[in-house]
Image (tube, helix red, strand yellow):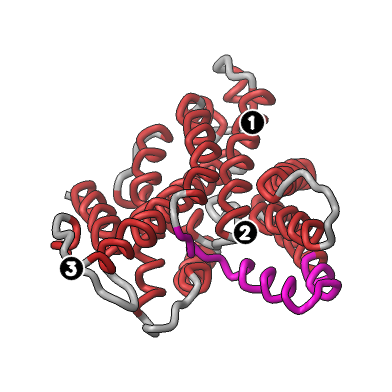
Amino acid sequence: MKRALLFLCAIIGLLVSPMLGAQSIPFAALWDWSDPVSHQILFDMRFPRVVLAALAGAALSAGGLVFQGVFQNPLACPYTLGVSTGAAFGAALALRAGSLGIASLGVTCCSFLGALFTVTFVALLGRRQSSVGMLLAGVVVSLFFSSLIVLLQYLSDYEGLFRIVRWLMGGLETVGWEACAQVAPFVVVGLGIVFVLARDLDNLMLGDELAASRGIDVSTSRALLFLATSAMVGGVVSVCGPIGFVGIMVPHICRLLVGGTSRALLCWNVLLGAGFLAFCDALGRVALSPFEIPVGVITALLGGPFFLILLLRRQGW
């Protein structure tokens, strides 16, 4: 029953969200070509946006699942560990370099390198720390990169400043399929690696010593999981900006309603993450229509109280 409810919610989120926005579009527009405006909005703007939301939601949810397993911390996710902020700094640096005409590795590549550096640094910094210490290490790294992003904003002109500030809010605004094509390879490859290493992730959740006793190459598995997650987060952040708390809400909901091994949880995380972010994006389009609320603002408004509840439950409240 719970699995059916989860599946139904995810599918409804994916199917209904293309029809919602400043201009509502009926389902008949899918096969009725008599209204070219509605048809163009649906196929050139709404569908690419939903696909981009599905890719981003799946990647961020899977990233949260991996981090919670590897770090053995239920509060870990790309946002709370500073990985999204590190990726955002890399992308913002590339944007600033591009505005100055300085050659760079590209927004996506710089975002990936920022995410990979951050997750590696946090892992090394928090290796001998408790789960709370690991979380604090992520917060410190996030604050550091946030200050560097503020510095880039200060050094930017008005146009560059507006571009960075708006991008940092997190958004799925896209026209056409170019953004989806840019993000999809990172997400598909990253999810494939995590799916293959799902058994290793199950063992890593029990501790390094027990995982090694079961024949798991702990260092290699952890490195590959970090690489896959960094690729997914970096690819998403380079296009959509940092979108917070998806990686902490969706894995906990799936674990509560479904449970099971990491491989099964990964499949449900991908499905619910896609539907959840598509729903949040649709909510942002209709809440203050005709104005749009960035999807990163919506997820932060939902994720903040969710994170607080998890924190209080861990303290025994």
Looking at the image, residue 286 sits to the left or right of residue 251; the answer is left
Tell me where residue 96 appears, x and y as whole percent: 79, 62
- Which segment is the magenta one? 149-175
Residue 42 within the magenta-colored segment of the rendering: no
> Is the residue 8 above or below the residue 216 in the image?
below
Mark 2 or mark 3, earlier in chain: 3
Q: Name the kind of residue labelled 3 in the image.
A: Pro
Q: Which mark is residue 222?
A: 1
Q: Name the kind of residue labelled 2 in the image.
A: Thr
Tell me where residue 184 appears, x and y as whole percent: 49, 41
Label 3, on which residue? Answer: 26
Camera-side residue: 155 or 65? 155
Camera-side residue: 165 or 10? 165
Q: Secondary structure at mark 1?
A: helix
Who's the residue at 52% across and 61% down the image? 245
Local packing at callout 3 (Cα closer than 10 Å; few below 14, some 14-19, many 20+) is some
Local packing at callout 1 (Cα closer than 10 Å; few below 14, some 14-19, many 20+) is some
Q: Which mark is residue 80?
A: 2
Q: Where on the picture, by quarter, is residue 264?
A: top left
Q: CA distance from mark 2 to mark 1?
A: 19 Å
Q: CA distance from mark 3 to mark 1?
A: 47 Å
> Is the residue 119 above or below the residue 166 in the image?
above
